[in-house]
Image (cartoon, grey):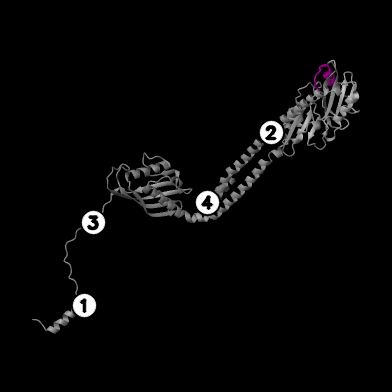
Amino acid sequence: MKRIKSIVSWFVHSGLARSLRFRLISIVLLASLPTIALLFLTASQARSDALDVAQVEANRIATITASEQAREMDRIQREMNLLSRLPEVRAEDNSACTAFFQSLVLTGETQIYVDLRVVGLDGSVDCRSAVSNPLGQNEDRVFIEQAIRQRSFTVGNYRINPMTGRSIVSFAAPVLNEDRTVTRAIVATLDLGDQSTGLTRTSLPEGSIISIVRQDGELLLQEPPQEGLRPGVSLIGTPSVNATIGQISETDEELIDDGEYIFASAEIKVAADQPGDQPAFIIVQIPESEIVRRADTVFRDNLAKLGVSVSIAILAAWVSADLFLSRDTETRKTIVAELYHSFSSGVVDHLDTIVSTNVVDHAALPDQAPGLDGLKQTIAAFRYAFPDGEVVPREMLADKDKVIVRVSLTGTQVGEFQGLAPTGVQMIADGIETFAFRDGLIAETWSLMGPLLELRIVSRPDKPDVEPAPAKTSVWKRLTRVFRGKKGGDTP
């Protein structure tokens, strides 16, 4: 630990750490850290929000798809009630009934039913659309007998067609005889895939799966079909199915949050009687990777942009370090001159750009507010006492982070200033002030001002009168005078 401390101490006091270039680059990197942290936090929140939105969407799609299946069964109920009232079905002519059923089943691509039959209470078949029975030898007859005895529309269990391997579901509706009695039922069998066309029309992210699963976990239908899965396969053990049918163990709870899919389920609720009590469920699975793909893409793009911005900032700091060093001295002098101009003009709006908010005035008055507010208070007091006052820097010297100024204060004192009563005359004071800079702003001030004196025009003392010296005669006049004297002779 001591060695580490010594290394850190050596580096802090080294020339590299004290250089302006290193400090500028360090500032750029440190300034980038909050942005990077915010970027990661935003990306995490975006992923979480995307998953929440996808969960809501999965719930909505599962509910809508289950409702569509229920409405489809309601439509079939209305159709079968109409079929049971047709003369071809109620008549005793089995050949007419068979031909009619075959016309409904054998319609190529527009096939509606897999099989249509009229079945008696004893199991006898009066007419049928095909010789083979898609329900097989182990046909569940409970729903057919209930439709006849209770004179109501009933739904059978979901089954697997042994001839095609596809899921089917059967419905039964009572057939009224001429005497209004019910001894037979019309039984319609539909292919679940043909009935569930809404599954293929649902818009979901790539890789999403919509499945119809029976209460016992048996797969009935899946869009798109997954490799290795076919109708009739038990899906018990998968997180979505276990959670849907309520078979959740401690191990399954770990599987539910496996990070691969989010899922939602909804029961297909049948309005009619369903004696077998084997409901089916719609299960919607959406891959998490697709949900967060957009958030991850935005995160990578923003991270790349930030990297470019930081690189440019580091390069700018490296190149401009020397410029800052050369211009630093003159810049500080200019800042001090701007501060004095505020005293002369009274304009203080820009002071927060040149003076630190927490500036320390080492010559502050007892009632002066701390920081920049106190400086503005001093300027206001100066302008009040000297409306025409000026603070003029006579000479400036700059060294490292300090500027020393020889300054003069002049102006007509019309108000009290620092305890001095107004004089109404021009006043002057000279002094020395020092300014310390930190981070490019004035951080500390020291002021040593002389007394405030009346500005007077000093005149020279009176001198005695002195007779003026005679003016000298020019050379030409003297020569002329001599020439005239010789011509006229000597005068006594």
Q: Of the residues under marks 1 and 2, which one precedes in the sequence?
A: 2
Q: Does the magenta stretch include residue 147?
A: yes
Of labels 1 and 4, the one closer to you = 1
The residue at which mark 4 appears reads as 18
The residue at which mark 2 appears reads as 57
Q: What stretch is highlighted in magenta?
A: 142-154
Q: How far apart are marks 1 and 4 (CA)?
A: 80 Å
Q: Of the residues under marks 4 and 3, which one precedes in the sequence?
A: 4
Residue 273 appears in which quarter of the rendering? top right
Q: How far apart are marks 3 and 2 (CA)?
A: 96 Å
- 171 left or right of 353? right
Q: Of the residues under marks 3 and 1, which one precedes in the sequence?
A: 3
Task: Kindly identify the amino acid type of the residue bearing the numbered disc 2.
Answer: Glu
The residue at which mark 3 appears reads as 459
Q: Where is residue 299 in the image (x, y as percent from the top left)?
A: 64, 43
- Residue at 40% x, 54% y is 396
Q: How far apart are marks 4 and 2 (CA)?
A: 57 Å
